[in-house]
Image (cartoon, grey):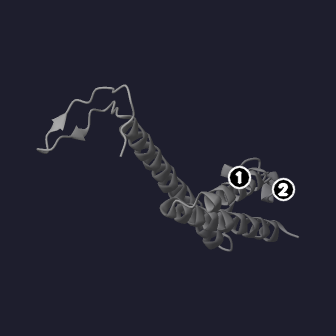
């Protein structure tokens, strides 16, 4: 196989892995929005596996014209972008990678918001709000003191 075929095969493999990751990130977001902890646990386990697989990607040794070799992903990127046959495939892969990065960031922020909400709810149940963000009957903020007992309904 020549360098173009090897490169296209590699890009296709990476696209497949990143598409799996993209789908898992969509499922993870759905599980977070639905508070489906079982689905979330499965997504996280699958995501860990596909990330390990992505991180294990290796560049095959390739010798280009004039004795140049591809030694890094930057070299490979430059080679692909300089090749009319690979340029579109490489751009598609980079778009997919960026979409995965964005979706992962969205999910991280969702998790952070859910954690903040859970901590706040737990503190309110305990009768303590360290942020003093409780409103009184007139709608004004009031300082909250730690009560010895839990709030009961």
Q: Is residue 47 left or right of residue 143?
A: right
Q: How many marks?
A: 2
Q: Residues within 10 Å of mark 2 (few under 14, many from 20)?
A: few
Q: Which mark is residue 48?
A: 1
Q: Nearer the viewer, residue 18 or 82?
A: 18
Could you give the CA–CA distance between mark 1 and mark 2, rounded to whole angstroms? 24 Å
Q: Is residue 58 left or right of residue 143?
A: right
Vertical arrangement, residue 152 with respect to residue 2, above or below: above
**Residue that numbered label 2 is attached to:** 60
Q: Nearer the viewer, residue 103 or 68?
A: 103
- Which residue is located at x 85 percent, y 69 percent? 2
Q: Nearer the viewer, residue 85 or 29?
A: 29
Query: Residue 125: x and y, percent?
Result: 39, 40
Quarter-wise, where is residue 90 in the image?
bottom right
Q: Residues within 10 Å of mark 1 (few under 14, many from 20)?
A: few
Q: Earlier in the sequence, mark 1 or mark 2?
A: 1
Residue extending furthest left?
A: 138
- Which residue is located at x 31 percent, y 32 percent? 131
Quarter-wise, where is residue 14 in the image?
bottom right
Q: Is residue 47 left or right of residue 150?
A: right
Quarter-wise, where is residue 5 in the image?
bottom right
Can residue 81 be seen in the rendering of this structure?
Answer: no
- Which residue is located at x 65 percent, y 71 percent? 89
Q: Nearer the viewer, residue 111 or 47?
A: 111
Query: Residue 147: x and y, percent?
Result: 33, 27
Q: Which mark is residue 130?
A: none
Vertical arrangement, residue 133 with respect to residue 44, above or below: above
């Amino acid at each position: 196989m020549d360098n173009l075929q090897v490169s296209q095969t590699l890009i296709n493999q990476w696209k497949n892995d990143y598409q799996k990751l993209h789908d898992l990130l969509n499922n993870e977001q759905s599980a977070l929005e639905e508070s489906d902890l079982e689905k979330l646990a499965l997504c996280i386990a699958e995501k860990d596996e596909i990330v390990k697989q992505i991180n294990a990607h290796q560049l095959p040794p390739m010798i280009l014209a004039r004795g140049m070799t591809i030694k890094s992903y930057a070299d490979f990127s430059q080679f692909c972008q300089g090749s009319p046959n690979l340029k579109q495939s490489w751009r598609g892969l980079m778009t997919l990678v960026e979409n995965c990065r964005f979706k992962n960031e969205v999910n991280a922020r969702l998790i952070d918001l859910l954690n903040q909400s859970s901590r706040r709810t737990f503190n309110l149940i305990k009768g303590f709000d360290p942020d003093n963000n409780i409103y009184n009957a007139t709608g004004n903020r009031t300082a909250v003191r730690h009560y010895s007992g839990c709030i009961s309904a």
